[in-house]
Amino acid sequence: MMKQVVLMYHDVYADDTSESGFQNVGAMPYKVNRKEFEQQVALIHDYCQEKGIDQSNISFTFDDGGRSFLYIAAEVLERYGFCGTFFIATAYIDTAGFLTKDEVLELKKRGHLIGTHSHTHPERMDTLQETKLQEEWAVSCSILSEILDAPMSIASIPNGFSSKAVLQAMIDNGITLIYDSTPTTKKRSYKGVTIVGRYAITNDMSPASVLSIIKSPYKRACITLRYDVLKFAKIVLGDSYLRIRDRLLKKSNR
C-alpha cells in the first residue's frame, strides 16, 4: 500500500504573482503558475489511475489564505477529483489578495477542508512568548469556527518554525491534527496529537519533478537530506537565517 504523500503549496497565479497572497520576497518562490499547477495535478491524477492508487493517498495542502485558493487551486483540484486542505492566516481575511469570509465558507461547501495557519502569520512562531502563542491560535480558531460554524481542529505552522511550546499552544486551543514543513511520509505524535509532514512545492520545480515526489522514495530521501541541512543552518544562524535568505532571493530576482 502506498504511503500518504502530502504536498505543500501556497499561491497559484494566472497572470501575475501579485494576484494572490503575500507579496514579500520570501513568498515569491512559492507562487506557482496556473498552467504549471494544472500540469502537476494532471500528471499525478494520471499516475494514480495508471497504478490503481487511491487518490486520497495524495494530499494537496495550501498555506496563507490567498484568493487563488478558491478561484484557481480548488477549481483545478475538483476537475481531477482531488480535495484540497486550505490553511488560513485569519488576520488577512477580507484584505486585498486574500479570501473573504464568504469565500472561506464557499471552499468548505465545495467539499474542501479548512484549517488555521495562525492569526498574523509570525515569521518565527517558535520565538513568541507564551501569551502571544496562545493568542495566535485562540483568535484564529475562534474566527474560523465562527465562519464555518464548526470547531477548528486542524492547523499548519507558519514557516515551519515549531517547538514544544508552539505545539502545546495549538493543543490547548483544540488542534488535534498538525501539519508542519518536515518532508516525510512518516506521521509523528506529540501528546496524542498527530503531526503530518509535507513536501514543499516551489516554482522552479517542473511537473515531472513534482510527480517524482509521489513516485520515488529516492527523490523524497534527497529532499529530506536537503531539508536537514537547511534546518541545521536555521539553528546555527537563528534570526539571521531569514535575513540572509531574503537578501539572496532579492539578488536572484534582479
Image (cartoon, rainbow, N blue to C red):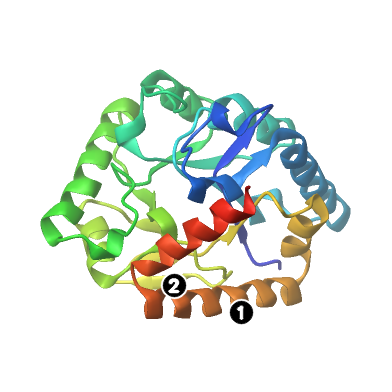
Q: Residue at x 25, y 59 (%)?
A: 171
Whole-percent x and y of residue 17? Answer: 60, 34
Residue 136 place in picture, x, y as percent: 23, 47
Coordinates of residue 71 in the picture (x, y in percent): 59, 24
Q: Residue at x 58, y 69 (%)?
A: 185
Q: Seen in the image, is 50 located left or right of residue 16? A: right
Q: Is residue 184 left or right of residue 154?
A: right
- In the image, is residue 140 above or below residue 106? below
Q: Indicate which disc, 1 or 2, sits on the residue closer to the N terminus.
A: 2
In the rendered image, the quadrant that contains the N terminus is: bottom right
- From the viewer's side, name the closer residue of 52 and 180: 180
Res 210 → quadrant: bottom right
Please tell me whether mark 2 sits on a helix, a strand or a loop.
Answer: strand
In the shown orientation, is residue 229 left or right of residue 163? right
Instruction: Please give the residue where the numbered disc 2 appears in the rendered image.
Output: 188
Tell me the kind of residue under disc 1.
Leu
- Pick whichever, 46 or 161, lies toward us: 161
Q: Amino acid at mark 2?
A: Arg
Question: Which one is in front, 45 or 76?
Answer: 76
